[in-house]
Amino acid sequence: MKILGIETSCDETSVAIVENGRKVLANVIYSQIPLHAQTGGVVPEVAAREHVIKIVPVLDEALNKANCTWDDIDAIAITQGPGLISSLIIGTQTANTISFVKNKPLIPVQHIVGHIYSNWLYGINEGETEDEISFPALVLTVSGGHNDMILMKDHHKFKVLGETLDDAAGEAFDKVARILGLGYPGGPAISKMAVNGDPSRFKLPRSFLEKDSLNFSFSGLKTAVIREIRKYIAENKIKDESELDQQFKADMSASFQESVTDVFVHKCLEALRQNPKVKEVMLAGGVSANTMIRSALTDALPLDVKFRFPKSILNCTDNAAMIAAAGYFQFQLHPKQYKPSTNIIPTTSFEIY
């Protein structure tokens, strides 16, 4: 079964075709990063306009890359939310129109669930192979707008164990990178700068919250970084953040990244302690591309627990292949529920069904 996925929740315009929920036949992503780097973050109106311009060319490119016609497509999966409402509207209206014109079942997918299903994907030209995923599994989503600790009992059967209380890790990465003048997006910029930094230079906080908590909070960490920067500016009598030296930026990046990583490791180990039947941990979301976080979890998790993250870096960020994969398994559970011309309405809700 071939599912065509469409993803426009933020600033990536993506269309993918995935076979049987796993094999990626095409995954075309048009990124707006160069455009939004000029303003240090995503401007919703600008993002929506770019989606309007790019959605049809990206759609055509995906069909061509997969060597498919519309007759080969069995259903359409579309990101319903959460995300920027103006961006979501472009994707959902496109999917609604195609569903009506081509008479294809339409499957609404929750964006965070899509990130989870990025772990099911493998490419046809990358030497990757399909492997089995065992349930129950623990899922840590680390992305720009949300962090979640999720117990996945089976396909599309989730129990949220913990979630973001204020700033998510990705948001904190972006804000700290902006303060340090490292550019946008913040995750890759900080990771690159941290390579030459000393993570022990700054004693930044680890927000573990109350005992046994699996929730996340990074607003205090962001505030601690700002205080250290202001202290350094005052002590060295420099004008502002623009005059910070490179070693300070590297050490702060390394210290910040280590603080975030320590929290994720602690929360995963605590979640495993509370759910001893789990033998598999998955990482998902844009920040899952961070090599330090991957390495730290690989070292910290018990040997009898399998650790999994998306095979391709492209599948970590927002993309349509993950939406198509989630849509496929959703369709398998309730095939009669999804019909053409459903008129999917976008939502900003973070609730995982």
Image (tube, rainbow, N blue to C red):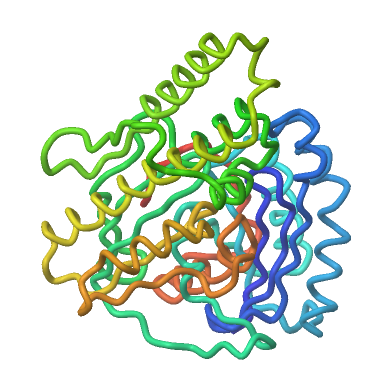
* Total residue callouts: 0
- In the rendered structure, the answer to whether residue 140 lies left or right of residue 76 reads left
Above or below 148: residue 108: below
**What residue lies at 39% left-to-right and 72% top-to-bottom?**
308
Above or below 346: residue 322: below
Please indicate, yes or no, whether residue 335 appears anywhere in the rendered image.
no
The furthest residue to the front: 236
Q: Viewer-proximal residue, 83 or 332?
A: 83
Q: Quadrant of the N terminus?
A: bottom right
* Residue 352 % position (x, y): 37, 49
Above or below 20: residue 335: above
**What residue lies at 51% left-to-right and 11% top-to-bottom?**
235
Q: Viewer-proximal residue, 206 or 271?
A: 206
Q: Quadrant of residue 42?
A: top right
* Residue 232 % position (x, y): 51, 18
* Residue 83 % position (x, y): 57, 40
- In the rendered structure, the answer to whether residue 71 lies left or right of residue 237 reads right
Q: Quadrant of residue 329?
A: bottom left
**What residue lies at 47% left-to-right and 76% top-to-bottom?**
120
* Residue 93 % position (x, y): 72, 48
Above or below 327: residue 251: above
Please indicate, yes or no, whether residue 68 appears anywhere in the rendered image.
yes
- In the rendered structure, the answer to whether residue 330 lies left or right of residue 164 reads right
**What residue lies at 88% left-to-right and 47% top-to-bottom?**
53
